[in-house]
Amino acid sequence: MIASLILTAMLGMGDVVIDDSPTRVENILEIDFEPVGTLRPKAVGEISSTRWTLDCGGMDREHADWRAVRGYVAPLGIARIRQQAGWARCEKDPGMYDFAWLDQCVFDAKKMGVDVWMELSYGNPRYEGGGGRQLNAGFPSSEEGLAAWDRWVRAMAEHYKGVVKDWCIWNEPNGRGTGNTIETATDFAVRTAEILREIIPDANIDAFALTFADPAWVEPFVKELKARGKTHLFNTIAYHHYKHNPDDGYEDVEKCREILAQYAPSLKLKEGEGGTQSEWCLNGALSRKHWTELTQAKYDLRRSLGDLSHGDDTEVFHLCDLEYRAVTRHWGLLRYGLLKTSGQADGFRVLKVKKAYYAIQNAVSVFNDALELESETTSAIAVDGPESMVVYDWKDVESDTPVVLFWNASETPSNENNMLKAKLTVESAALKNPVWVDVLSDNAYAIPESCIKASKGKTVYSVPAYDSPVFITSADILTLDQSWYVREGKDLNKK
């Protein structure tokens, strides 16, 4: 029996309401295929999802509250969260560190089986020249401010040694108005990484989370690192990825990858922040556009699965909506969240679970460490369909079963589902129990024999496509809930 709603109490922190029914996401598609089941959500502990990160940042500036949303983390299936440490919140009085607010997140997440990617970000106005606590405030600049920063970083590393292994140095140092230069950025990154390495020798350290994959920043930075002999301090450079069409911008990512291969081949890239809002909002990346829950879900899927399909780890921004306050202005609630939440005055209460939450949950349940990308020579080719359709070859690690992921990447996600016809040629024999799966809604459909033509080791599938990710594979490698769709003689699990 399938309950229409799950109500769970996560670690004694109150009721969490998550719909796990097969109809939890309404996504109307005009498709003639027979529905045969839905993807079953998989929580942390059921899968390995090391390439995904869930953003839980902003709590350092009290834009959100961990206690209000914590119960929605583990069911999503993502086993790593991003948290911003917030020097100014940790050290309100010089020399006195208060990690209690951060501990409740870090140690709580670890109990759930979720790791923390800790970002050391923003300055502390308690010190002259210590920098500001807001976005684009710039690095600490005075001798006093930098010395206080060093002490705080050391205290952080000692406090979380053995608990936090993944670290990032500063959010968006290349943002407009920061005043940061490559030289000051290199100085700052090196001094911070050396402290972390001294205390946590096996730490994974990201040299910044850039506003975007910017070759004009990355090249001089890694050249300077190489010249100083400091490349070994870092593992990764993270980048943020905000484009109105989520499939734009990968050219710059590839340019950055080429730069790293030339000057710092030990360093890798990863996407460290990306997503959009679920309604019109006044501020924030991609704001002042009439986003909806549907277009947000499509965007988040295309952004995340596109990152993974280009070989980078991905990060979903954000778990919950953020009440954004800058130094001189209150911008209200920014609706990037997978959860719609109220503001601070109402305790950041969860108002609803958005479509994007379930869409990402669906994606993680399949595109986790059980799959891997095929070689750069793709076996799946769009031979007939929209010119801008992207196609990515994945396969099930255990069985080598193809998983062909594709969508129409021509424009910003639409609030309508305009289905197109496409043909995919897969260099393998016909799939056993072939299905077409809509990631957004989690619905799986049997691909009829009339839409499959196999010849000489290749198989052509005539299938629908639209501006949200779908994939074809064998039902045998999926965990499908068939209780609502099974008809006599239609059970795909029958041998």
Image (spheres, rainbow, N blue to C red):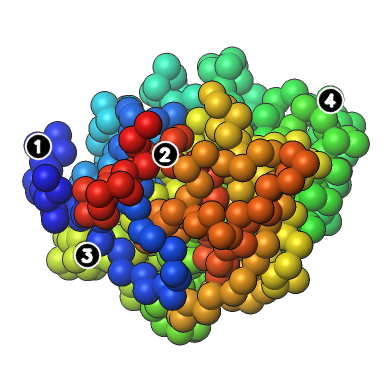
Location of residue 461 with respect to 386 vertically, above or below: above
x and y percent of residue 107 in the render?
A: 29, 29
Q: How crowded is the residue under tag 3: few (<14 C-alpha within 10 Å), some, or many (20+)?
A: few
Q: Are marks 3 and 2 in contact (CB under 8 Å)?
A: no
Q: CA distance from mark 1 to mark 4?
A: 50 Å
Going by the numbered disc 1, the residue's amino acid type is Gly
Q: Quadrant of residue 84?
A: top left
Residue hosting label 2: 478
246 relative to 331 in the view: left or right: right
State the quadrant of the C terminus.
top left
Residue hosting label 3: 352
x and y percent of residue 292 in the render?
A: 40, 77
Q: How crowded is the residue under tag 2: few (<14 C-alpha within 10 Å), some, or many (20+)?
A: some
User: Which is more N-terminal, label 4 or label 1?
Assistant: 1
For the residues carrying marks 1 and 4, which lies nearer the camera in this image? 1
Q: CA distance from mark 2 to mark 4?
A: 48 Å
Of residues 220 and 401, which is closer to you in this image?
401
451 relative to 228 in the view: left or right: left
For the residues carrying marks 1 and 2, which lies nearer the camera in this image? 2
Q: Considering the numbered disc 1 on the image, is that residue within a helix, a strand or a loop?
A: loop
Residue hosting label 1: 12
Location of residue 132 with respect to 220 vertically, above or below: below
Q: Are marks 1 and 2 in contact (CB under 8 Å)?
A: no
Q: Are marks 1 and 4 in contact (CB under 8 Å)?
A: no
User: Which is more N-terminal, label 3 or label 1?
Assistant: 1
Q: CA distance from mark 3 to mark 4?
A: 50 Å
65 relative to 205 in the view: left or right: left
Q: Considering the numbered disc 4 on the image, is that residue within a helix, a strand or a loop?
A: loop
Residue hosting label 4: 229
Of residues 355 and 164, which is closer to you in this image?
355
Q: CA distance from mark 3 to mark 2?
A: 28 Å
Going by the numbered disc 2, the residue's amino acid type is Leu
